[in-house]
Image (cartoon, rainbow, N blue to C red):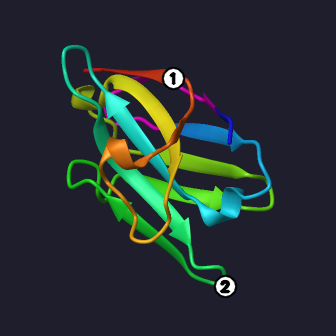
């Protein structure tokens, strides 16, 4: 699986950005897809992830720091996953990475994710 993240940029506090991650590979739908972020001098941290149960249910998991502000979604037909980020805060500033990993349960550790896209910078100013 090859992943390509896009959509980063700059925003004012309280603003919104939408990140996209395009994936190659025929087995995209079988993976949990996650978004991680890494601020300067800090470790990479989990932000959100989603998996599909093969039927009609999409599960999502969020870090407490983004819950209620970020929404992760996926389009299996387009091999894409998105992260809608609203009510942005300066502390959301980081390089954001998309990743693909085992599906069930949704992993939060970056060590569980085998495939990574390049990062996309998100900068939120106060």
Label 1, residues with CA under 10 Å away: few <14, some 14-19, many ≥20 = many
- Mark number for residue 55? 2
In the image, is 106 to the left or to the right of 44? right
Which residue extends farthest top? Answer: 40
Taking the spot 73% from the left edge, 58% from the top edge, the residue there is 27
Q: Secondary structure at mark 1?
A: strand
In the rendered image, residue 8 lying in the magenta stretch gets the answer yes
The span from disc 2 to disc 1 (Cα, nearest Å) is: 31 Å
- Which residue is nearer to you in this view: 40 or 8? 40
Q: Could you tell me which quadrant the N terminus lies in?
A: top right
Tell me, yes or no, if residue 75 can be seen here: no
Residue 44 among those drawn in magenta: no
Location of residue 46 with respect to 8 vertically, above or below? below
* Image x and y of residue 34, in percent: 46, 49
Report which quarter residue 37 is drawn in: top left
Q: Position of residue 106 (x, y in %)?
A: 40, 64
Mark number displayed over residue 120: 1
Q: Residue at x 25, y 21 (%)?
A: 126
Would you say the residues marked 2 and 1 are in contact, meaning their CB atoms lie under 8 Å apart? no
Residue at 52% in and 66% down: 51
**What is the tally of numbered marks visible in this picture?**
2
Left/right placement of residue 56 relative to residue 68 reads: right
- Mark 2 vs mark 1, foreground winner is 2
- x and y percent of residue 96 in the render? 43, 30
* Res 95 quadrant in image: top left
Q: Which residues are magenta?
A: 4-16
For label 2, the SS is loop
Image side of residue 49 versus residue 44, left or right: right
Q: Earlier in the sequence, mark 2 or mark 1?
A: 2
């Amino acid at each position: 699986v090859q992943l390509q993240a896009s959509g980063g940029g700059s925003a004012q506090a309280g603003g919104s950005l939408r990140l996209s991650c395009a994936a190659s590979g025929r087995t995209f739908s079988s993976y949990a897809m996650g978004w991680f972020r890494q601020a300067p001098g800090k470790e990479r941290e989990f932000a959100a992830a989603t998996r599909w149960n093969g039927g009609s249910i999409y599960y999502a998991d969020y870090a407490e720091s983004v819950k209620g502000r970020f929404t992760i979604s996926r389009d299996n037909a387009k091999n894409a996953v998105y992260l809608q980020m609203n009510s942005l805060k300066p502390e959301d500033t980081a390089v954001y990475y998309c990743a693909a990993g085992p599906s069930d349960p949704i992993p939060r550790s970056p060590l569980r994710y085998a495939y990574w896209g390049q990062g996309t910078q998100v900068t939120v100013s106060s």
